[in-house]
Amino acid sequence: MQILLPERNQTPLSGDQHHLLQQFIAALSPEQAAWVGGYLTGLVANNLPAVAGADDIADITILVGSQTGNSEALAEQMHSLAAGRGLKTVVKKMGDYKFPQLKAEKNLLVIVSTYGEGEPPDTARELVEHLFSKRAPSLKHVQFAVLGLGDSGYEFFCKTGIDFDRRLEELGATRIHPRIDCDVDYESSAEAWMDGVLNELSARLETKSQTAELSPPSLASTSVYSRKHPFPALLLENIVLNGRGSIKETHHLELSLDGSGLTYEPGDVLGVYPTNAPDVIDALLQTLHFDGTERITFDEKDCFLYDALFSHYEATTITRPVIRNYALLANNRKLDQLLHDKQKLNDYLHGREIIDLVSDFPSDSLSPQAFVDCLRKLPPRLYSIASSLKQHPDEVHITVAAVRYQAHGRDRKGVGSTFLADRIGEDATIPVYIDHNTNFKLPADPATPIIMIGPGTGIAPFRAFVEEREAVGATGKNWLFFGDQHFETDFLYQAEWLRYLKNGVLTRMNVAFSRDQQQKIYVQHLMDEHGKELYAWLQEGAHLYVCGDEKRMAHDVHAALLKIVAAEIGTDNAEGYVVNLQKTKRYQRDVY
Amino acid sequence: MTELTPEELAKRVEVERIKDASNYLRGTLVKSLQDPLTGALAEDDTQLSKYHGIYQQDDRDLRDERRRQKLEPHYQFLVRIRVPGGVCTPTQWLEVDRIANTWCNNTIRLTSRQAFQLHGIVKRDLKKTIAEINAALLDTIAACGDVNRNVMCNPNPYQSRLHAEVYEYARRINEHLTPRTTAYHEIWLDEELLSSTRQDEEPIYGKHYLPRKFKIAIAIPPGNDVDLFANDLGFIAIAEDDHLLGFNVTVGGGLSMTQGDTSTYPRLADVIGYCPKNKALQVAEEVVKIQRDFGDRTQRKHARFKYTLEDRGVDWLKFELNRRLGWNLEPPRPFVFEHSGDRYGWVEGANDTWHYTLFVPNGRILDTEDCPMMTGLREIAKVHDGDFRLTANQNLLIGQVSSKRKPVIDALLEKYRLANTHDQTGLRLNSMACVAFPTCGLAMAESERYLPSLLDKLDVIIKQAGLENDPILIRMTGCPNGCARSVLAEIGFIGKAPGKYNLYLGAGFYGQRLNKLYRENINEEQILAELSPIIQRYAQEREPGERFGDFVIKAGYVKAVLAGKDFHW
């Protein structure tokens, strides 16, 4: 049957959806097509949730604040599950949310992530500020529940979720289900929370009658491969981008997505499931006086301790839950004391790993099972995608800095980065999935200018951006800022940038190499130096993107931006100008 | 100089267009130096930088690796420092040493034209490097490019009084033919010399400079270590009782050729007459101007003065030169050349002074575990009150050492293991290789990095034949451009491809005859198999005093090359 689907940009579909629908339609007989048409029409009439219109108040609002897209994916899942129970929900992004609407909410489900040192996502900042200000409304009529997302490897784990939970209560709202703080292995705990919340809501709300036998389609997944079912991607290429003599070791990896049905857009993120380094596991087992052949139960299955540690558990990073779990078992007075002194605990955790914990505070009665039960699951590692599918069909590229250092007398290595750098043989596959990041996207209009700031591996998504802009023949100007240590060895993708400058795809590029001269120069200094032009670009409607190190770079870049704007329109107006950039999605960040 | 119409310019080669548009060698060099995105210069500027003594190169060992790493080639620069006649002061030596260890690859290369070469300078350090060289009262302008290059003069240690007088001519000719453009001072030294009343002009060169590089040397017989006949213009010093009278003038030498193009060939200069010493500068200027006006600017590989001469004839040249001089050259005076190599160790000069010639393998000054030569020379320079002279064979002469200071220098030579560097076979002492890989963009095969290990194997054959004390000229270049003058070697190698060389035999021992292709495109095993029986036969059958280059012709291995035109035939 010959049906031509309109081009994707003329439909509301994502790239994946468009692709799958095209495949699906092509295989249909006329009878099948007629049935599917009727079915979908009925489904929409009965069941499709309202699209988030500004004034549309549903029974339940799912308010989502996302940095990399995980929260949004959970919100979609919640939305589907709710629909399955006949509950009408609307998903709203915090960045788009109109504050006066708070008063009108009945049931508010907050799904929000925390990143860096307890920071809210960029899109959530304003709402957080509003809630914590004197202007925050009374929310006595509101019922709420909070799901926080975070990484227990950081000190202020799930802080934004905790803040929401506390503040909503302070404002008089009623908590209908306890908050959950989800770690990087969030799937099962998030699902349990959703079940619990929906049970509560179902009991409280009069459920509308539904065509119950129809299970609603999931909007989120379009490939059979997902975070839960990663695709085994073949490694095509592994190149060190740093020239000889560099102290950096940045790998460019090219993976095949052939046959996966996975698609992505520039700005999306690749999730990678690593394994631990065998020498790290060996050393840990030795310290614990285990030999690895002990049997344990993992995920209701019986397996060797070694295999479980190798593939399934975080065997290096100490999170606070892990150290607390271990303390309960170890029965070690010194460890208990440490846990009660926040400053000392912070100092201890700095640069230490699980092997240090078990060797500094040994326990003579620890069973293999008890030990692994202390640990958290090995979470996938996320890497900003460095390629455009349009230039590299069926491939995905990432840029990975191999992390290796010495601390407390031991050689340390980053789990994900050294897994990718060292331990993927030729013809080996890597379990991967795509994490769609709607908060880091090229402007819809290809004529819009963009400014990209990406030092170090922060350059990765901008390789994808520029490849995409070239592939679609975008007419908008492109300005790239890059920085690293040394020009000769650390100018990542230099030959490609020079080509783009020559053929005009890149309009301009500024580089800072911090260690090539006496005084250290970073990207923010370059911004400063070209502040007038940068502001002029913003005035022309340019979108500004920042990717890379969160702690130092992103803050310094933000400060530089404020300074540049302040120089043009005054300090008093600068903050508002930049906030407005964020609000209108013209200032987007992918920082870690 | 007259302006060219676009049509006229279009007939010329690309480099002529670049020169034309360069505003007296400025081009866009300043902008190129400031571009932080690349370690290279803009393409046109890579031609112009040569006139400032700077070659853009890249580390060819890393070229492919870096391409895969998505990095541009590892661009770096060679800076050639002019040293007229090869003479510099100990203070200048110390400065060159310091610069080499600050901005370069910690080595100094002595060239076959008595210049210093510094390698491995990255673009952002280039300006500082040039400025510091100038601060040491040395310069780099016109060390490369289509202009007159460093004027050579043999550092004759036997006749120091005569040398001093002849050297003065080398210095003055060098000075007289230096480009007048102020671009060099503007770009590298931040000096603004132009104003509304002072504009750039090039009274000798004009704005298009020469069609091709131009080389001048002065020789003091019986030494021909400068290989005078390889130069576009040569002066043979004619003296009486150690006093300079004048010069025989030679024209039309040049060694470079293009691989696979037999219309290009090396050519030795013709002796065309004699001029009194006070006319030397005028002769030099007029010969240069003749080449400026008649050289072929439409084909770069046919642009050297030797082709102008071949195309128009030596008689035409004499006529044209005499016409321009306004007087006639006299008939050449008799002279005898006897050698073209260096004499190592101490030699006593005039006025109670001594000279020490140090064997520097391939002209590369560096510290190795076996021999801390760079450190040793630095320590010597700190106490030395004479001069240093770079020889045309890439060796170094520590000159004008007073007999009082001699023991001090001796002790330092001993201390830094420099006293016996010439304890080698005559073959190795007369060896010379060009730089080639990894920096030279023209090289097709290794040279400086390979010749020493080939010599290790040839030395075995030489020693078996009992020839360890016999000087034999052996030279290697990585391409046919002839930096190490391989076509003037009794055993010459020209690189064809990695590990493959053309083998040439039969040049004259004192630079009077070109060699001839003997075997093409052979590897080391074949080189040794070819040379071994010839060396053995030479040892057994040679007449007393017969040179290796003469013997191979007599024995019928190759024909004697009597004129450059016949080199390929």
Image (cartoon, rainbow, N blue to C red):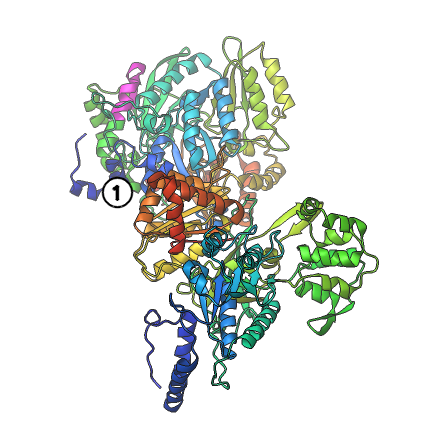
Q: Does residue A200 show up magenta in the picture?
A: no
Q: Quadrant of residue A99?
A: bottom left
Disc 1 crowd rating (10 Å Cα; few below 14, some 14-19, many 20+) is some
Q: Quadrant of the C terminus of chain B?
A: top left
Q: Quadrant of residue A177?
A: bottom right
Q: Position of residue B419 (x, y in %)?
A: 61, 23
Q: Main secondary structure of the magenta part?
A: helix
Residue B560 seen by the camera: no
Does residue B238 sit above or below A253 in this rendering? above
Which span is picked out in magenta? B273-287
Nearer to the camera, A14 or B428: A14
Nearer to the camera, A414 or B328: A414
Q: Quadrant of the N terminus of chain B?
A: top left
Question: What element does badge 1 sit on?
Answer: loop
Q: Does residue B282 show up magenta in the picture?
A: yes
Does residue B344 sit above or below B533 in this rendering? above
Tally the numbered discs: 1
Residue A456 seen by the camera: yes
Q: Amino acid at mark 1?
A: Val
